[in-house]
Image (cartoon, coloured by chain):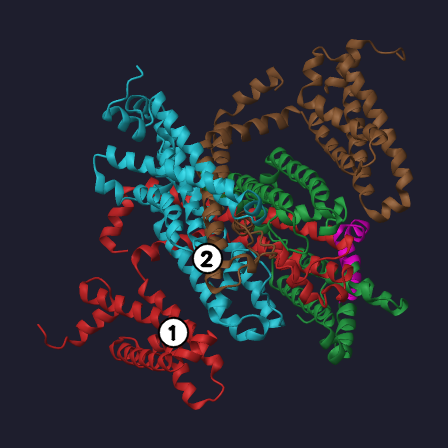
Chain colours: A cyan, B brown, C green, D red
């Protein structure tokens, strides 16, 4: 009972999540990932770094060593080693541990530190649950169905941003903060998406009139992605409901 | 007719709302709650506090005494006293009167004063009408049906906020107001939700480019909660309409 | 042919819009209203007022006299004179001419001037076309169907604004611009609706955390009115489509 | 095989996009248009203009000459020359080359430069693919069906903007930035669309109260265009799905 598990059993625990041991492994990993991301976030706050810097430093090394052991374990247990190492999850796993080791060699390691926040993406692996996969597949298929609509939408947004940015660059000019077309396009995006920082805003009468038009356009255009997603979701829902009992029966059998 | 009502009758007036006396009680209580909240709000305005402070002070004590009497009455009339006292409504009722009494003992009672604004939540009790309960139940069941979709949505938003916050912390840095990852994440939320205060905004070219991406993402992502709520509402509506007369008959019988 | 029209004919021209003369009357009135509103708007611009003030003054008197004649004509032609004079349209018609006459008597007539902008509401009379009325009735009935949902929504928004405003008033305090609960509630509305002026914004860490919550709440809550309106519109549409030909036949008959 | 293609063949390559040669022509043109727009954008950035100005100048002439040759080719190949020259695409094609030639004659050609950004619109020609046309036609017909709803919506927005702008001009006045009714209307649009720059924001208590109302109105009104677009899309989708195979067969036959 307390004997060391076989390699097959270990691989099951590490890669699957359908019994108690493997679920506990996933839960433990989830907690470790969240804590390690929290350490990265807290360490970026000046006051906390000054007061608890060394504690966070040792915690960081603890997480790095645990994740390194897990990374080596995953390589050892994998059936398709190159596929794991050069796949999405393998690279995310490597990026989670590399910055801490590199900080030993490199002096200016401040930027590397933040790469560790990408550890958060490791959670995706744990959330590979059937329910989420099915929903994600539904969303993906809905978006695929609306591909043409989405391309028209994105194209319209880009055209409005480019044309309005160019026009505002002429109307307002560098003296009002529109120092270049790229900056005027940044302003157009800030306005069209209704974010409206106010770091750049029109000062001339004509500029304010053009800005009013782009705002009202943005107000109307926001309806398009909403309409696309909603109609696809409503349709997918009515199809699922129509399939009804049948779907549920299939699900019970195939554990999807 | 003018004799004092029995305890059963009183309990009915206080806890139910299906005849004239109990409806009048609820209406009176509603007016008192709104007035007492208005007093709290007005008292926070410096000019009003200086000119009418003492009037508001006596009004406050009037409301507190009335609510205290009501609180004691509710305890006395309740069939399940611990259930009431330690339940949601009992605690809200207690929080509505406690701050005023504590202000007699404590010197620094400024913060307690504002707790009294939570009295507003007492209105929920009065609004416990069947129509609202049914609608609230419909909304709750719609949200429950979309649990997986909502979790994917919230997860995506948190991931974008964390990853974009970390990236912007590196790109813009403390000299542009992104003093720490938590603050950069606050900026990411301000941007993604299209609020856009402008208290922190990107100044570098690369930062403005990344900000443009997060804004367009936010513009697209807003469609997801709308799609979820709308498709659930449309579906719930069509089901209710299909059930038609039958539903109404059930409602008439069971008083729901 | 060129003889002066009868009173009945005049009433038809003024109050109806189903033949050429009455349509021309409406069109002329529409142009006059738009021009007179334009004069009010332009007169508020300092540079234009200084340069073209006297021209605008005489134009203003021209419009006032025309609208006064039209007002007297409408009273004379009306079958239900008190009903017209004290009704919505009568009051709007009176407000359109009163300020100019009052400006002769009163010195400080600056504020009265702007009341003339309400002339714009006179356009509503001209737009009393069947198609608009039917659509407006559809919208109104859709909103009426969703009365309970809308009340829950408005109630939730008000509760969030009051509770979050009070909490932010304590957390941030007058030194960060949250000088009173009403002002903190104004901030809460600015944030919840994703307007985000940035005239007041949280400076403390805790305040920024609470602000993040209210922003994400606002992001989610915006889905509710959209869901309500969309599901009602979709339902109304499918009902209209189902009725199909029949509806059209009825419309042709009853001229609705 | 390597002989020069006939005029018919050339016209096919230039105007159609259903075989390899014509698709390659379109792709090459797409790349040239995007590069030439990129040159215009980059040239507006001061640092890039100072360092790489002459390179961009020669690139600009290269694109202009290529587009001029293409323009002449299109005129030569067109069956309906006046129809092309004075049509939308002909004018866009001319605007894409004219500014560079005019910059030789005119001194102050800074503004003309930006007209070249309209070259981006030339992409529309290349995207004249059947799938996009069908989707665009669906959207256009959906918007046409909702014409009355959209007019009511736009009318309501304009009325709110005019009335609220006038009221805020009186309440806040020039000392708070509301220097004229047009500027107050600009503020009303900024607020109603939830952009919220914060360049103008209410300072008085009454002004903040009115602003809160317009914000909540904007929050509710945004639901209307979303509702219109979504219900039309859902309806169009269900009709397309119902038609099913039949539609596809028609499409295969008529090449739409």
Q: CA distance from mark 2 to mark 1?
A: 21 Å
In the image, which disc is placed on residue D39?
Answer: 1
What's the magenta region? Answer: C67-94
Residue to which mark 2 is pinned: B210
In the depicted structure, whether residue A57 falls above or below residue B76 = below
* Helix, strand or loop under label 1: helix
Q: Position of residue A108 (x, y in %)?
A: 43, 56
- Total tally of numbered discs in the picture: 2
Q: Percent position (x, y) of residue C169?
A: 72, 44
Q: Seen from this angle, which residue lies furthest bottom?
A: D105
Q: Are marks 2 and 1 in contact (CB under 8 Å)?
A: no
Q: Position of residue B27 (x, y in %)?
A: 78, 27
Q: Chain of mark 1?
A: D
Q: Is residue D244 magenta?
A: no
Could you say where residue B173 lies in the image, as x and y percent from the top left? 52, 57
Which class describes the residues within 10 Å of circle 2: few (<14), some (14-19), or many (20+)? some
- Name the residue rendered at 64%, 53% in the picture: C128
Closest to the observer, D116 or B166: B166
Q: Can the viewer see residue C33?
A: no
Say above or below: D55 vs A45.
Answer: below
Relative placement, left or right, of C205 versus A95 is right
Mark 1 closeness class: few <14, some 14–19, many ≥20 residues within 10 Å:
some
């Amino acid at each position: 009972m307390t004997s060391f598990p076989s390699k097959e059993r270990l691989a099951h625990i590490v890669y699957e999540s359908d019994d108690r041991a493997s679920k506990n492994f996933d839960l433990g990993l989830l907690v470790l990932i969240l804590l390690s991301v929290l350490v990265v976030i807290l360490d970026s706050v000046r006051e906390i770094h000054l007061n608890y810097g060394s504690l966070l430093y040792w915690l960081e090394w603890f997480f790095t060593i645990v994740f390194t052991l897990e990374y080596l374990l995953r390589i050892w247990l994998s059936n398709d080693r190159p596929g794991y190492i050069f796949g999405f999850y393998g690279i995310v796993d490597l990026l989670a541990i590399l910055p801490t080791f590199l900080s030993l060699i490199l002096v200016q390691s401040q930027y590397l530190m933040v790469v560790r926040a990408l550890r958060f993406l490791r959670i995706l692996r744990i959330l590979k649950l059937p329910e989420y996969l099915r929903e994600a597949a539904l969303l993906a298929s809905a978006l695929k169905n609306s591909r043409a609509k989405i391309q028209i939408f994105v194209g319209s947004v880009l055209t409005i941003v480019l044309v309005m940015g160019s026009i505002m660059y002429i109307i307002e000019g560098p003296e009002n903060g529109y120092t270049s077309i790229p900056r005027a396009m940044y302003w157009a995006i800030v306005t069209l998406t209704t974010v409206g920082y106010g770091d750049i805003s029109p000062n001339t009468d004509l500029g304010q009139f053009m800005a009013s038009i782009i705002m009202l356009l943005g107000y109307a255009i926001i309806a398009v992605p909403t309409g696309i997603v909603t109609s696809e979701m409503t349709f997918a829902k009515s199809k699922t409901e129509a399939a009804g009992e049948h779907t549920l029966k299939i699900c019970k059998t195939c554990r999807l």
